[in-house]
Image: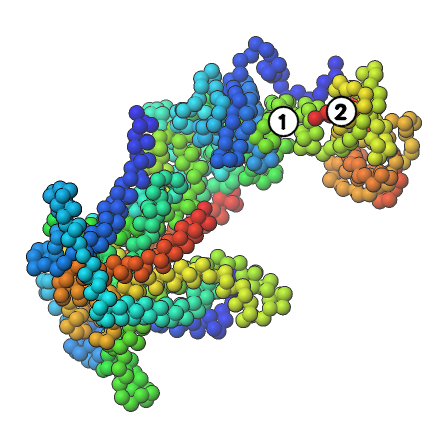
Amino acid sequence: MNTTWSRFNIASLVVGFAFLYLPIVLLVIYSFNESRLVTVWAGFSVKWYVSLFHNQSFIDAAWVTIRVGLFSATVATILGTLGALAMTRYTRFRGRLLFSAMIYAPLVMPEVITGLSMLLLFVAVGMDRGIWTITLAHITFSMCFVAVVVQSRLVTFDRSLEEAAMDLGATPVTTFFKVTLPVILPAVVSGWMLAFTLSLDDLVISSFTSGPGATTLPMRIYSQVRLGVTPEINAACTILIAIVTVGVIIASIANKQREVQRARDEQAAARN
Amino acid sequence: MKSLGSFRRKFAPWNDPEAKPFIAIENVTKKFADFTAVDDLSLNIYNREFFALLGASGCGKSTLLRMLAGFEEPTAGRILLDGQDMRGIPPYKRPVNMMFQSYALFPHMTVEANIAFGLKQDGMNKADIDTRVAEMIKLVKLERFVKRKPHQLSGGQRQRVALARAVAKRPKVLLLDEPLGALDKKLREETQFELMDLQMKLGLTFVVVTHDQEEAMTMADRIAVMDKGKVMQVATPAEVYEAPNSKFVADFIGNVNMFEGMTENVANGKIEIAVAPDNMLIRTDATKTCSVGQPVGFAIRPEKIRISRKQPADATFNSAYGEMWDIAYFGDMTVFHVKLDSGRIIKAASLNAMRTVEDPFGYDDKVWINFDTDAGIVLTA
Amino acid sequence: MQRLISSIASRLVIVVPYIWLLVFFLVPFFIVFKISLSEVAMAIPPYSPVFDLSAGWTAFKDSVSKFSWDNYIWLTQDPLYYRAYLSSLFIAGVSTVLTLLVGYPIAYGMARAPATVRPTLLMLVILPFWTSFLIRVYAWIGILKPEGLLNQFLMWAHVIDTPLNILNTNTAVFIGIVYSYLPFLVLPIYSALEKMDYSLVEAAEDLGCPPIAAFWKITFPLSLPGVIAGCFLVFIPAVGEFVIPDLLGGSQTLMIGKTLWNEFFSNRDWPVSSAVAVILLLLLVVPIVLFQRAEARAQESEK
């Protein structure tokens, strides 16, 4: 593998990453702006964060968002993992084509369609709209993302581990909980994180499926944004960005350390 | 009395008509869609036997092993283990354990936990599990590594954990899928003997699948040579090598010179074969009953052919003239390729018993080859 | 007993997610279709006939007989709708090409970077994807508006004298889509390029192929599966995009996602918005099926 930096490669990476990060960085910087005018820098201040924490409607929305996120991510992870198992372990069952279509389609389905169709379902069965309908909708689309993440781990899974467990007397159910699940756990955890973030970030589907009293943070931010850019929204966005960034960075550092430790162990094992 | 090769031990229940097979494979066929992996195969394996299934990849040996373990069900036929029909019994209820080619060690468990896994599934109590695990760890000499996880072990250590885990439950039969395949050559040779000792010590029946003939010859009491889902020959290693029953087996095991000819004379326990293309006459012990004028094959191993510069005393039979074409030096032995006038290459091997040789053979030397009447074997299949 | 549990468990693995998706993903589409055949009513829910299972078969037949294609006819008569569809396809298509032009060099640069920094670069591309879509679109408002940061910068640098009008135009929508969907395109291309054996390019050059020709003859064809997957991942959701045209586009920016949203939330015309959704889905069926087949094939080949 040729690993020398060519000038073209460096230029495309620098320009590309500047494009990706500059808007976010500017947004974060201006959340600390003294002035109410978002585009004029008037000195450093955290007053927008203070006012944000006194804004009850934001706090309520944050709570709704977190509850929906935790619950929907957990259920979506269970369903998505089952879906991934069904896709990889049972190559032939009736309706498999439809099943895989239903797993992949939500990944690209325009959100307005998913949102509208879910809402019409809830109305048709006479379900009161609110935090539960949002949760059901979030479970449905995020389970497909979990399924894809877990599936990509399962295709490289060494099936002989499961056969070994059964050969040693473990029933298929025991085998799943004692061998399969622990081995694919990192993928299941990242599936959960993905589902949680998707739920945290969703605006369109939540807007369709919510009802009175159930406003999520993105819905709150959206209705504010329509009225114009304010430093308070910048502050709210910055908090969300910070939570996600810290989470992702911690996860990837932990991952990296595990890999480094593993490489070191393997080297040590090869020596003795 | 003369006999073939050497005995490993005085153990031959397959010659005893009274002995009951421990594993009886009866007319087993296994089909995957339209591919027949195992084709109407019957085989008896006896208690405490070290049995090897030998064949090239795709010959059906692994499928047969997986049917014994219960991962595959036969399409037809049945498998009896200690008299009990195994049909429909899932792998986790069979009294057999398997050592996997990839070892399949659980990556999230320590050495100890891996070995204890099967015992826990049996609901054995904690104290007994601890005793048994300790015993197994001692058996495979892994005392220093009990708390390690698989990725912290070397290849040889992993192999021993896999072995300990598979025998911990004291299965009636241990199945081994290419048990030494992942080890390097030197370690493989050592481990072969360890496996044999372990089998003796534990008194278990071992069924090993391998594509490595040396491995099978070294370890097994008997070898089943497989091809295209069928057993070609079942015999002791010495019989398979010295008395192959077919051209396939003769060719598959070791090196061989194969001649195709026509019988000319059958008398007094000797057969004379005319090999027309090489203008050669072979006179050999009648290892098969043949009639005159029958097309037959004649197989002879390279180490049973002599090379000399002088013409042998009786050059009517079993000799030919040619030139030295290639010389391959292996250290312990040298293999010579002699090109006959007909263009055919004959392989002859000689042991380098002395450090120094007077007047060694060189390329293009004119030489004679010859062999004795009991050196080769007549093949009709 | 154990075997019974096992066989039930193995059924559940398939049945539970299957039924969930049938109920919450597939069935709703039929409901959307059915409502698209209904008429607006001043009621709750605001359409008739209402589908009532408890009323029995005759009532069902009765309500079926009241179905009408009026909403679809309406969609063809009002130029707003078909222009919105065409405009959505156009904007999504142009944006996909632009995203590819921006994304391919990034993916290429990442795949050719030293192996030690590759994981970091990968994380840097994924990180924005974890941040809210809404926030990322919002960030551009402050940059693109007339008194925004971009105009301030360009005027400070004396590139322009009067502020450019970018916000509330299609240009802003293109920028927003390229920006938001960039990781979706970079990742599949990167993984295709990273898997590629670089000695293939060296072999081509050794056989007398200049570097640029080697790129077009070797590297690009081998990255094509990633390019195709990435383009689907951008194009399909972009056609139905709502947030970007709503926040960055202007009144003349027609996109079907925005039209649907307005029909639903502003006009409260559920049947027409359902009809809009059905047509949009029909437009997207072909690309979705192609995408799903490409993904399934990629999964199979990895096994």
Using the image, name the chain to which the residue with label 2 belongs: B
Picture quadrant where residue A93 is located: top left
Relative horizontal placement of residue C45, taking residue B31 as reference (left or right):
left
Instruction: Name the residue type under label 2.
Output: Val
The residue nearer to you, when weighing C188 against C295, is: C295
Would residue C134 be seen by someone viewing this image from the given angle?
no
The answer to whether the residue labelled 1 contacts the one labelled 2, judged by CB atoms less than 8 Å apart, is: no
Quarter of the figure with the N terminus of chain B: top right
Q: Residue C185, how many percent across, how many down?
A: 38, 63
Instruction: Count numbered badges in the picture.
Output: 2
- The amino acid on which the numbered mark 1 sits, given as a three-letter code, is Met
Can you identify the residue that label 1 sits on? B232
Q: Name the residue beneath numbered marker 2.
A: B378
Q: Choose between B165 and A66: the one closer to the eye.
A: A66
Relative to B91, C165 lies left or right: left
Does C50 sit above or below residue C188?
A: above
In this rendering, position of residue B267 left or right of residue A150: right
Find residue B305 and report its horizontal and vertical position in percent. Answer: 80, 31
Residue at x 77% of width, y 26% of height: B295
* Residue farthest along the top direction in this orientation: B18
- Where does residue B291 sit, x and y in percent of width and height? 79, 19
The x, y position of residue C253, in whole percent, is 25, 74
Q: Residues within 10 Å of mark 2 (few under 14, many from 20)?
A: many
Give me the disc on residue C106: none
